[in-house]
Amino acid sequence: MLQKHQAKASFFLTGRFYRNPDFKGLIRELKKDGHYLGAHSDEHLLYCDWTKRDSLLVTREQFSEDLQRNYQRMEAFGVKKSDAPYYLPPYEWYNHSIANWTEAEGLQLVNFSPGTRSAADYTYPEMGNRYVSSETVLQSIMGYEAKDRNGLNGFMLLLHIGTDPRREDKFYHRLDEMMTLLEQKGYRFVRLDDLLEQRKN
């Protein structure tokens, strides 16, 4: 769909993903097509408690070692740390300490823009009331676009590259529909680094 729409995206992948031989071809193709390849931690660590966010579950040393392993995996695909200065923390969950540690590593922590249910595209029916259908995800995106005075200008929309097999209603099957609707409204899809560099200027 990205090729069809001539769109660029940003893929924040764990070290586990980068080192999985089944994904090597996909990663090389993403790089060849000009998409941003970033880090998402090596082992997808949970940095802080879900209910007490200021309580760290990792040490500074664990954080740094895990992060460095992620970037080492990326180097196998010709992606250096300097090529990928934006870092998406695992679970998109962090606190002030994690933000400071990320900055100390010479990186900029980023997260998705709130307001839609796009990040819930990983859920599956067995999760009960936490499950969010693809129709609900799509309607939340289009609904936000319609009601916010800035629409989706500058919006960082997070979608998952893969989901649990128990989710048969895959949102990526609705990508063509979503992208077509948004392009009809004048939007275009760009890499996160291009978006953020435009904001600086």
Image (cartoon, rainbow, N blue to C red):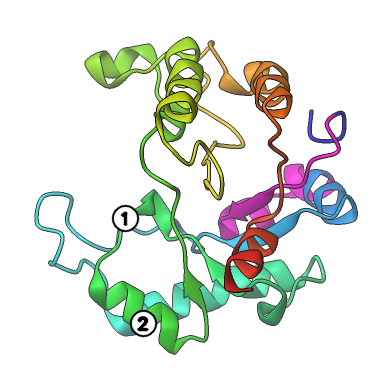
Quadrant where the N terminus is found in the figure: top right
The answer to whether 7 appears left or right of 89 in the picture is right
Quarter of image, res 125: top left
Crowdedness near tag 1: few (<14), some (14–19) or many (≥20) residues, C-alpha within 10 Å = some
Crowdedness near tag 2: few (<14), some (14–19) or many (≥20) residues, C-alpha within 10 Å = some
Amino acid type at image mark 2: Trp
Q: Residue at x 71, y 33 (%)?
A: 186
Query: How many labels, in total?
Result: 2
Residue reaching furthest to the right? 32
Q: Which residue is mark 1?
A: 93
Of 159 and 194, the residue lying toward us? 194
Q: Give SS at disc 2.
A: helix
Residue reaching furthest to the left? 52
Q: Position of residue 10 (x, y in %)?
A: 66, 52
Q: Position of residue 76 (x, y in %)?
A: 78, 69
Check if residue 189 falls in the magenta segment. no
Q: Residue at x 64, y 73 (%)?
A: 201
Q: Residue 177, relative to residue 152: is it above or below?
A: above
Q: Give SS at disc 1.
A: loop
Check if residue 12 falls in the magenta segment. yes
Q: Position of residue 126 (x, y in %)?
A: 32, 14
Q: Residue 120, relative to residue 48: is it above or below?
A: above
Amino acid type at image mark 1: Trp
Label located before the other in sequence (1 or 2): 1
Quarter of image, res 77: bottom right
Residue reaching furthest to the front? 149
> What is the span of residues highlighted in magenta in the rendered image?
5-25
**Residue 101 - label:** 2
Q: Residue 129, relative to residue 39: is it above or below?
A: above
